């Protein structure tokens, strides 16, 4: 599998990374009377794998979608390479962004192959790559069945393929691991490692703390829309999170520690 | 430009392929049209002359009612699994997407009309038509104009609560000029010796289409990219 | 903060406007009932004309304002543009209702039919339907930014429709001389005066309603901002707590 992954992401090599950094400055996003994201500032570089953590409702998905240019920040700005603003230059940016969202972003009535072929056609990617992606994500037998018949894990794998088809420079993932078995999770992290080796920036929103050691470089913790911790990940993610919370980001609240372990209990065996 | 064309073609292919697999919209739309005409059959047009007068109105009202059924549903498909967000991540998708949705809506509605028009003719015992190409042209223009507004409004309302109810409420007043022209033109075509020239009305329909194709295309970009998945 | 001011006492100019409007309305009414002569055939009922015609103009003014503000909103989204658009729609619908009620009332008395089916009335009816639907979308959609965009689209389409509605309806009914507006049917100078006074009066009333509604809208936005401010202060407080920890 590693060979296939190496081979396939080799398709990324001839294409230099178009975006190498993103800067968020005092980004706030409001929904009516509520701040979903409040004054978040951070700076991310290509080649980093960043985990975006937080409780439900903390603003992770909103922030991720803002970075994907689907939601415009109401205050502050998000800029790629200090030049591309996420509000003004949406069209130019989107060519280089990949989104793996909570929903699969796929058409249930079409087969896996048709979905990928459509994305390839829409993004000017040669269709022969569809076959390679199907192999990589181990979906060859199911390729011609409607996506509606796929299991959750299969759908997630197909969305990974869909998101990476156009070789984006920045890959944004919203809870990509929910519903994946151990093997599929391992596959995901291998793909991420391949992306990282090629200088791509990967941001992963996750509740899963069972991440392979060394897969993540950085951890951002959101609480109620605010960025309360921005730490390099040393050791396991769980340790880093505990450290962040012990430092006062958790407000000395044992409840948040409890909630975190509860969500890891959801890890699919 | 070529790229936009290819994108449009890929999207139309997708919509039609999905529709062909289930044929949901065609079946329910077609049946709905037939049911409508049947209702009108029982609405008491006894006199032959009255029937001939009422037929154009019945035809166009039926097209309007069936149309909203079609337009709402083509967008529903994209909202499943948030496929729309995936599409929006493709740069420059708004123009081809609008054209593709419009094409799909027009084609589906025309297919249903192929059933509806004969049904009305049969029910109302209509005999002669002044000019068949004229009737085709009138139907085509009316369908196009109706679908133009229907597409942009369905996109706008896609993430709102009660969108199935809101779409007709919002769409019908706007298309009254088109509906009126269609009815009058059809009437003139059915009674070639009575009043007016149907080509006058075609002029109005063309003006409607010209204005709203441009406006709807511009507004579609705003309507569809609102960042919420509902 | 600027926005809070809308919740304070009304500015002197607003009080002045209200006063002026009050005066203008009484003056106009006085002129209409005591100065302008009764029309020969229709009698007192014809006086509805002094309400009907200016209301129609004001209704359209409201709708055009709504469309203009909507265009501004789409080009540069701001809550203020949206509030103005909504105010224009609401006041427009209000005056439209007046037109659609007074029209048939007058027609009934003057010509015996409730509905004359003349182009102008049909156009007003259609615009009323469009903008009532606009208000309905507002009611259903809530205060989200998406609803604002949808309504902006709707307003622009609605006003763009006007020439086409006129074109099609006039072709249908024939562009007859506007019976209800009574233009050119020989209005005496006294009637002119009363009519002008009515325009001024209803115009001021329109402006007053608009301003009040806009004030209300700005106030609502201020309240929303207030909630956000409270939340922001909480965040700032928590941040300082953490720094100390």
Image (tube, helix red, strand yellow):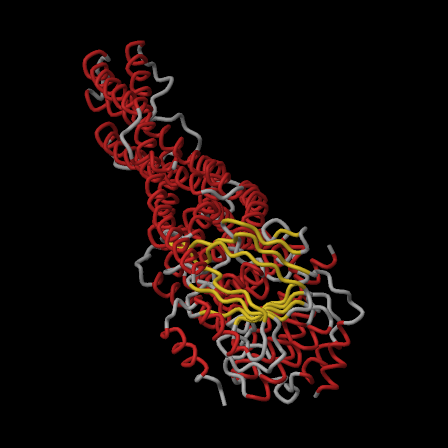
Q: Is residue C185 left or right of residue A76?
A: left
| Residue A139 in the figure: left or right of residue A267 | right
| Name of the residue lying farthest toward the top | C189
Using the image as rendered, state which of residue C156 and residue C152 is in the foreground. Answer: C152
Q: Residue furthest front?
A: C244
Quarter holding residue C207: top left
Which residue appears at 73% of the width and 85% of the height? A4
Please determine whether, in this image, residue B139 is positioned above or below residue C67: below
Toward the viewer: A165 or C187? A165
Residue A71 visible in rendering: yes
| Residue A31 in the figure: left or right of residue A105 | left
In this view, the residue farthest toward the right is A14
Q: Which residue is pictured at 71% across the width and 62% down the height? A: B6
- Residue B9, compared with residue C190, is above or below; it is below
Q: In which quarter of the image is the N terminus of chain A?
A: bottom right
Total numbered labels:
0
Q: Position of residue A147 (x, y in %)?
A: 56, 80
Residue nearest the observer in this picture, C209 or C4: C4
Against C191, is C124 above or below? below
Q: Percent position (x, y) of residue C188?
A: 31, 11
Q: Where is residue C121 in the image (x, y as percent from the top left)?
A: 35, 35
Q: In the image, what residue occupies the spot 44% across and 34% down?
A: C64
* Residue at x-position 33% and y-position 34%: C6
Q: Is residue C38 above or below residue A237?
A: above
Say if residue B129 shows up in the picture: no
- Residue A188 point in image, percent of width and height: 62, 80
Compared across the picture, whether A98 is left or right of B22 comes to right
């Amino acid at each position: 599998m590693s060979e296939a992954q190496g081979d396939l992401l080799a398709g990324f090599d001839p294409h230099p990374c178009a975006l190498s950094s993103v800067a968020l400055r005092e980004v706030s996003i409001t929904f009516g009377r509520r701040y979903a994201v409040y004054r978040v500032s951070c700076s991310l570089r290509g080649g980093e794998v960043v985990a975006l953590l937080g409780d439900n409702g903390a603003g992770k998905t909103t922030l991720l979608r803002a970075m994907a240019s689907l939601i415009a920040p109401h205050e502050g700005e998000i800029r790629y390479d200090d030049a591309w603003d996420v509000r003004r230059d949406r069209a130019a940016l989107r060519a280089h962004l990949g989104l793996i969202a909570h929903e699969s972003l796929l058409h249930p009535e079409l087969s896996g192959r048709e979905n990928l072929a459509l994305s390839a056609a829409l993004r000017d990617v040669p269709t022969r790559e569809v076959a390679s992606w199907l192999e990589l994500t181990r979906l060859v037998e199911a390729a011609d069945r409607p996506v509606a018949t796929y299991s959750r894990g299969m759908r997630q794998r197909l969305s990974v393929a869909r998101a990476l088809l156009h070789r984006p420079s920045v890959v944004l993932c919203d809870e990509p691991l929910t519903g994946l078995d151990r093997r599929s999770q391992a596959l995901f992290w291998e793909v991420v490692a391949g992306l990282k080796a090629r200088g791509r920036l990967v941001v992963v929103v996750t509740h899963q703390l069972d991440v392979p050691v060394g897969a993540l470089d950085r951890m951002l913790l959101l609480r109620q829309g605010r960025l309360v911790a921005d730490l390099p990940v040393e050791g396991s993610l769980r340790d880093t999170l505990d450290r962040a919370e012990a430092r006062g980001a958790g407000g000395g609240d044992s409840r948040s520690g409890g909630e975190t372990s509860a969500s890891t209990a959801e890890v699919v065996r | 430009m070529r790229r936009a064309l290819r994108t449009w073609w890929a999207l139309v292919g997708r919509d039609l392929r999905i529709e062909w697999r289930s044929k949901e919209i065609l079946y329910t739309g077609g049946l709905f049209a037939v049911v409508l005409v049947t209702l009108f059959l029982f609405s008491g047009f006894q006199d032959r002359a009255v029937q001939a007068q009422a037929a154009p109105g019945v035809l166009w009202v039926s097209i309007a009612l069936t149309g909203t059924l079609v337009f709402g549903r083509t967008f529903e498909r994209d909202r499943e699994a948030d496929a729309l967000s995936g599409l929006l991540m493709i740069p420059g998708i708004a123009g081809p997407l609008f054209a593709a949705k419009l094409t799909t809506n027009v084609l589906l509605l025309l297919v249903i009309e192929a059933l509806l028009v004969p049904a009305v003719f049969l029910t109302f015992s209509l005999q002669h038509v002044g000019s068949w190409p004229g009737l085709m042209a009138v139907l085509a223009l009316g369908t196009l104009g109706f679908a133009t507004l229907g597409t942009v409004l369905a996109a706008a309302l896609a993430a709102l609560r009660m969108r199935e109810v809101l779409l007709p409420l919002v769409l019908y007043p706007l298309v009254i000029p088109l509906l009126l022209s269609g009815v009058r033109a059809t009437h003139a075509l059915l009674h070639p010796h009575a009043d007016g020239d149907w080509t006058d009305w075609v002029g109005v329909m063309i003006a409607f289409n010209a204005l709203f194709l441009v406006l709807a295309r511009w507004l579609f970009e705003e309507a569809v990219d609102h960042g919420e998945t509902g | 903060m600027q926005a809070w001011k809308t919740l304070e006492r009304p500015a002197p100019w607003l009080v002045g406007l209200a006063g002026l409007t009050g005066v203008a309305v009484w003056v106009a009414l006085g002129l209409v009932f005591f100065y302008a002569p009764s029309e020969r055939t229709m009698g007192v009922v014809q006086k509805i004309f002094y309400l009907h015609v200016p209301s129609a103009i004001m209704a359209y003014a409201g709708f055009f304002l709504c469309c203009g503000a909507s265009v501004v909103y789409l080009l540069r989204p701001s809550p203020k543009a949206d509030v103005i658009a909504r105010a224009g729609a609401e006041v427009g619908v209000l005056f439209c209702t007046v037109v659609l009620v007074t029209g048939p009332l007058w027609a009934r008395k003057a010509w015996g039919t409730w509905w004359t089916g003349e182009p102008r009335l049909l156009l007003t009816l259609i615009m009323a339907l469009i903008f009532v639907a606009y208000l309905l979308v507002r009611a259903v959609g809530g205060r989200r930014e998406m609803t604002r965009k949808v309504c902006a689209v709707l307003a622009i389409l609605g006003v763009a429709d006007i020439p086409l509605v006129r074109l099609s309806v006039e072709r249908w009914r024939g562009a007859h001389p506007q019976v209800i507006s009574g233009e050119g049917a020989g209005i005496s100078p006294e009637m002119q005066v009363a009519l002008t006074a009515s325009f001024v009066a209803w115009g001021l009333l329109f402006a007053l309603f608009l301003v009040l509604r806009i004030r209300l809208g700005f106030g609502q936005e201020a309240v929303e901002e207030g909630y956000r401010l409270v939340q922001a202060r909480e965040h700032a407080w928590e941040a300082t707590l953490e720094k100390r920890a």
